[in-house]
């Protein structure tokens, strides 16, 4: 397993051309990982399909910053034993999606869910399990060649919104959003992934402006913490 000494953020930049017979299999998500003082740093860069006339994904308001808010400990519950997650639900943006495990490819990059399956998100299995102590990471495409994908609406989430993750052990873990931020795709801070001593969750997709030659410029990161389980 190749882990670079420092995070590097590299997109699968395969812009579509005007040839209808060309490869329109889409865009990818790759992220280098680094372990720094026990913290996994993950930077995500996603390239859009660039479908003509499609509105850009909704973006958070003025939330570009260095790191997420501390948010206090109100409503926080004790972490659970680890278990594999299978489903993510975000009612406020009508997300109901299965989860697949994603890991590293032979070159040491985070694998993406298949881009042709719009309603599918990926749990990075080498980070914490949702509900266990640590920061769990779920990634999803914002769009594909056919249009909006699973995390298209992620940028409209606000503090107080609910996220639920179902696990193989039958536990439904409830998370509450406490911050939403936008980062340049090559400057996602390692602090996003710090172990806070609690069970936390990050939902990540791309955002910002789109350039055909380089993809989306930014990442949208949603910060949430576990507030219930049952």
Image (cartoon, rainbow, N blue to C red):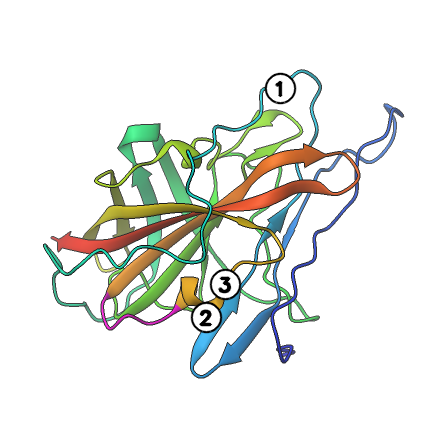
Figure quadrant of residue 6: bottom right
**Secondary structure under the numbered disc 2 in the rendered image:** loop
Mark 3 crowdedness (10 Å alpha carbons): few <14, some 14-19, many ≥20: some
Q: Which of marks 2 and 3 is in front?
A: 3
Q: What element carries label 1?
A: loop
In the rendered structure, the answer to whether residue 172 lies left or right of residue 127 reads left
Instruction: Find residue 126 and name its label.
Output: 2
- Asked whether residue 183 appears in the rendered view, the answer is yes
Q: Residue 54 carries which label?
A: 1
167 inside magenta stretch: no
Name the outermost residue toward the top.
53
Nearer to us in this view, 215 or 108 = 215
Q: Answer with the quarter of the image where residue 27 lies.
A: top right
Q: Main secondary structure of the magenta part?
A: loop
Rendered position, 176 above or below 39: above
Q: Earlier in the sequence, mark 1 or mark 2?
A: 1
Q: Mark 3 points at which residue?
A: 189
Q: Position of residue 218 (x, y in %)?
A: 58, 45
């Amino acid at each position: 397993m190749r882990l670079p000494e420092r995070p590097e953020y590299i997109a699968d930049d395969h812009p579509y051309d005007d040839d209808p017979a060309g490869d329109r299999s889409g865009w990818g998500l790759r992220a280098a990982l680094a372990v720094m003082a026990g913290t996994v740093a993950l930077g995500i860069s996603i390239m859009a399909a660039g479908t003509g006339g499609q509105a850009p994904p909704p973006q958070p308001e003025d939330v570009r910053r260095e790191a997420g808010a501390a948010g206090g400990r109100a409503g926080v519950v004790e972490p659970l034993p680890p278990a594999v997650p299978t489903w993510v639900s975000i009612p406020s943006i009508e997300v109901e999606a299965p989860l697949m495990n994603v890991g590293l490819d032979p070159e040491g990059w985070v694998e993406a869910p298949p881009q042709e399956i719009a309603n599918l998100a990926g749990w990075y299995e080498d980070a914490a399990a949702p509900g266990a102590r640590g920061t769990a990471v779920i990634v999803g495409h914002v769009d594909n060649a056919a249009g909006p994908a699973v995390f298209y609406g992620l940028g409209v989430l606000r503090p107080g919104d609910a996220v639920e993750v179902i696990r193989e052990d039958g536990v439904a873990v409830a998370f509450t959003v406490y911050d939403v931020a936008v980062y340049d795709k090559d400057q996602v801070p390692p602090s996003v992934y710090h172990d806070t001593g609690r069970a936390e969750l990050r939902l990540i997709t791309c955002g910002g402006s789109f350039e055909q030659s380089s993809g989306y410029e930014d990442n949208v990161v949603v910060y949430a913490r576990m507030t219930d389980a049952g």
